[in-house]
Image (cartoon, rainbow, N blue to C red):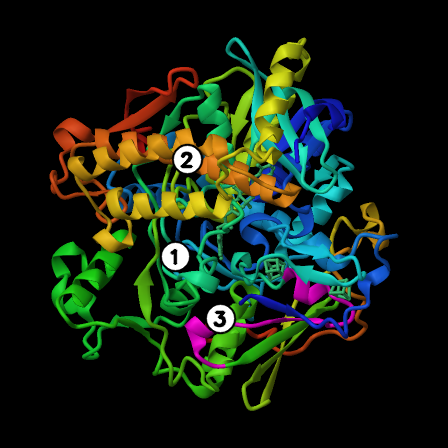
């Protein structure tokens, strides 16, 4: 069936402040903007429904960036810096640290249940985290946004930024339910679409392929629209690989910090202390704990566990129920086997690599106000770079910081005419995948191929996450071919059309990622970025940021180096 | 597998006159309404197991099922979202049930700004106050 864009209805909207993605960062941004300015017009474009979208759809059971008693923003900064091998944007991390508790206070005011001890203190889970009962966190945040009367357009998938010269004028998208083409013109635009899952082959296959830790519906769109517009990106090479509970890929914090379960191998040895003291024992960086676990497996002492056998029966039952707040499948997993963590301690494995600035630091290169390198464009949350370990609270803080800057500059910002020709071009780019060509490729097929290439040649699970130049040059070549093939992607309905664009976006992320991985000729973050051909950390040459700018016409990725500047806070304090 | 929608229990929630809760909730746009007026999932392999659809279905027609690849056994998880808590029922292959309750929300400081009709995450308002697991912090 031939499909013509003439039949597509166009919805044209003008606003002051456009927010792309109604997740943690986007929602806090809307809330803050309204608080500062009763008159500001706010539009939010969300590919799902604001009540249950993004990383928080299932809920969470902790807030992982928080300043507990005895800690300070300075100690938080110091911890993040050490855990990230000294290369972070200290200014960004510090600005987050100063406000994470404020973000949590807001969440609690909005109704998030946060348990307290007899002294009224929130329960610390490790030094930088607290326990929450967050199954309903997303609807609670959504309600805060509803109270602002911001215009929320659900089920609109953003496909590109609108650009004129060096300026961003808003964004394009399509309605995955109504089939309309959306043109939203804005004085300022905030990208808050989260990170990218699904770039690499996942742990599980077949019917279980979406049992991944990160949201499979956060597909790197925010990175891709910025890449295509020529925004500068930073540190994609610091991928995030997490240690997770096998099969269900559930986070381990509730077990490791929550009930202080130790990592043990098949022989019951506490291998971190016993064998990896040189990496720091139990104080070792997050990625090293996984490295040690892989090593145990490689040397025949796997599987490894989080040892929960010491729990009382009641504690084990509570732990089991606790996961209903975040990974309900894990609770079912224990129930189905008629067991609990007491007699079935969780086995731990490494996930496939994700590109996510809220845990590692891949993302937009931004200034302290979260402004990107293009005019009128901002980024916050998992899509923003330079500040690892921001999690849900830090993402909210970044959204608020961006909203403040946008509000303060609003008087000097304007709408500008958009070229009709560009509108037509984008409409065609978006909808032509509903035209069945003589050759057609389904989004699932292309996705599988991409994930396999990335797994084989760009340091996926099957190669123990290790990279080298020869493999990367193969990844580069094959991903380039796939990008050429992507013009044959075919979606026979709007849902499939969305999936076409998800793979297209992931391919752009993969393209930039490969160049970052290839450029850094050292190993700075074992596992996240392990080079077989440059196995050592090299501070003399590489204590600096690797950034990139993509040229959408030529397809070239230009690498730019940026200095790593300490805020010297720790020294002056 | 991800979810199973019981075609007998699903009553279509007034579709096509209104948007159905399950269809509204899914973060992956996976649930669609069939021509017979009942909900179905388009691709179970794409399900993230988030349970958003399960908690909000007024007929409790949806349950979570783990893929055979992972558990090798059957079992299911159902849930219902009340305003203050969520009640969960996990069932193993032999039909043994375990019931859990998780607190959902406290009163919001913004409640005067929000239309009570807009509690779109809640099946219907629950009157009692949850006691179970409010002491979750202890020992965890
Ligand atoms: C399973 C899991 C458990 C976690 N647990 C915790 C925890 O216990 N504690 C903690 O502090 N942190 C936790 N995190 C991390 C935390 O959830 C994230 O860091 C945080 O949600 C990031 O906020 P964000 O706004 O950047 O992204 P998100 O909250 O994911 O929001 C991104 C939004 O953008 C939308 N979007 C994406 N693409 C498009 C597009 N093309 N057009 C329009 N909209 C789009 C998405 O639908 C989504 O609503 C967890 C994350 C995961 C995945
Ligand atoms: S919410 Fe439940 S009853 Fe309503 S349409 Fe969906 S599956 Fe059917
Ligand atoms: S469990 Fe979540 S991802 Fe799966 S169908 Fe339901 S709402 Fe969608």
Q: Which residues are magenta?
A: B52-73
Above or below: residue A225 compared with residue A376? below
| Residue A493 seen | yes
Residue sticking out furthest to the front = A438
The answer to which of A490 and A138 lies nearer the viewer is A490
A365 falls in the magenta region: no
Residue named by callout 1: A127
From the image, tell me which residue sits under label 2. A507
Q: Quadrant of the N terminus of chain A?
A: top right
Horizontal placement of A113 versus B16: left or right? left
Within the magenta stretch, is there residue B65? yes
Residue at the spot x=34%, y=82% of the render? A309
Crowd class of label 1 (few under 14; some 14 to 19; many from 20; radius 10 Å): some
In-image side of A252 versus A47 (left or right): left
Quadrant occupied by the C terminus of chain A: top left
Between the C-alphas of marks 2 and 3, the distance is 29 Å
Q: Which residue is mark 3?
A: B67
């Amino acid at each position: 069936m031939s499909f013509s864009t003439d039949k597509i209805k166009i919805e044209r909207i003008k606003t002051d402040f456009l927010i792309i993605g109604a997740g943690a960062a986007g929602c806090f941004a809307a809330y803050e903007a309204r608080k500062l300015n009763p008159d500001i017009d706010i539009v939010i474009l969300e590919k799902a429904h604001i009540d249950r979208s993004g990383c928080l759809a299932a809920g969470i059971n902790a807030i992982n960036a928080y300043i507990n008693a005895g800690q300070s923003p300075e100690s938080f900064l110091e911890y993040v810096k050490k855990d990230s091998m000294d290369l972070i944007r200290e200014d960004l991390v510090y600005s987050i640290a100063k406000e994470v508790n404020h973000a949590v206070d807001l969440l609690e005011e909005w109704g998030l249940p946060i348990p307290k001890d007899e002294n009224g203190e929130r329960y610390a889970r490790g030094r930088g985290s607290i326990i929450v009962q967050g199954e309903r966190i997303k609807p609670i945040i959504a309600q805060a946004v509803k109270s602002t009367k911001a215009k929320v357009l659900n089920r609109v998938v953003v496909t590109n930024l609108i650009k004129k010269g060096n300026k961003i004028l808003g964004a394009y998208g399509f309605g995955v339910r109504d089939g309309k083409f959306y043109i939203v013109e804005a004085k300022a635009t905030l990208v808050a679409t989260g990170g990218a899952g699904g770039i690499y082959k996942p742990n599980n296959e077949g019917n279980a392929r979406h049992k991944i830790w990160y949201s499979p519906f956060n597909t790197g769109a925010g990175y891709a629209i910025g890449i295509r517009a020529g925004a500068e990106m930073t540190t994609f090479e610091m991928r995030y690989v997490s240690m997770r509970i096998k099969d269900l890929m559930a986070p381990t914090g509730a077990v490791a910090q929550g009930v202080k379960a130790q990592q043990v191998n098949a022989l019951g040895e506490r291998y971190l202390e016993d064998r990896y003291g040189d990496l720091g024992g139990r104080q070792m960086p997050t990625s090293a704990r996984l490295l040690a676990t892989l090593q145990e497996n490689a040397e025949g002492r796997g599987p490894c566990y989080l040892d929960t056998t010491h729990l009382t029966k009641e504690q084990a039952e509570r732990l089991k129920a606790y996961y209903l707040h975040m990974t309900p499948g894990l609770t079912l997993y224990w129930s189905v086997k008629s067991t609990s963590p007491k007699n079935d301690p969780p086995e731990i494995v490494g996930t496939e690599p994700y590109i996510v600035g809220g845990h590692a630091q891949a993302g937009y290169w931004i200034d302290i106000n979260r402004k990107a390198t293009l005019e009128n464009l901002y980024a916050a949350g998992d899509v923003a770079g330079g500040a690892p370990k921001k999690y849900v609270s830090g993402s909210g803080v970044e959204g608020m910081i961006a909203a403040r800057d946008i509000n303060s500059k609003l008087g000097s910002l304007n709408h500008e005419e958009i070229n009709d020709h560009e509108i037509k071009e984008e409409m065609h780019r978006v909808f032509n995948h509903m035209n069945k060509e003589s050759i057609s490729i389904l989004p699932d097929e292309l996705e599988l191929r991409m994930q396999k290439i990335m797994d084989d040649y760009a340091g996926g699970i099957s190669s123990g996450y290790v990279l080298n130049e020869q493999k990367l040059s193969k990844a580069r070549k094959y991903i380039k071919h796939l990008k050429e093939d992507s013009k044959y992607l075919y979606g026979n309905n709007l849902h499939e059309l969305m999936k076409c664009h998800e793979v297209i976006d992931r391919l752009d992320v993969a393209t930039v990622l490969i160049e970052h991985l290839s450029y850094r000729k050292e190993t700075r973050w074992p596992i996240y970025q392990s080079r077989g051909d440059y196995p050592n950390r090299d501070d003399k040459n590489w204590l600096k940021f690797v950034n990139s700018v993509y040229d959408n016409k030529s397809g070239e990725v230009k690498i730019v180096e940026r200095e790593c500047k300490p805020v010297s806070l720790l020294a002056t304090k | 597998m991800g979810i199973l929608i019981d075609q007998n229990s699903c009553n279509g929630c007034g579709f096509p006159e209104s948007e159905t809760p399950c269809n509204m909730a899914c973060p992956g746009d996976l649930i669609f309404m069939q021509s017979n007026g009942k909900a179905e999932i388009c691709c179970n392999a794409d399900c993230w197991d988030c349970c958003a659809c399960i908690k909000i279905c007024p007929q409790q027609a949806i349950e979570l099922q783990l893929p055979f690849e992972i558990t090798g056994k059957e079992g299911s998880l159902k849930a219902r979202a009340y305003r203050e808590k969520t009640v969960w029922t996990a069932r193993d292959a032999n039909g043994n049930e375990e019931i859990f309750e998780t607190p959902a929300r406290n009163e919001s400081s913004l409640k005067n700004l929000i239309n009570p009709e807009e509690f779109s995450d809640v099946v219907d308002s629950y009157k009692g106050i949850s006691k179970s697991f409010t002491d979750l912090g202890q020992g965890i």
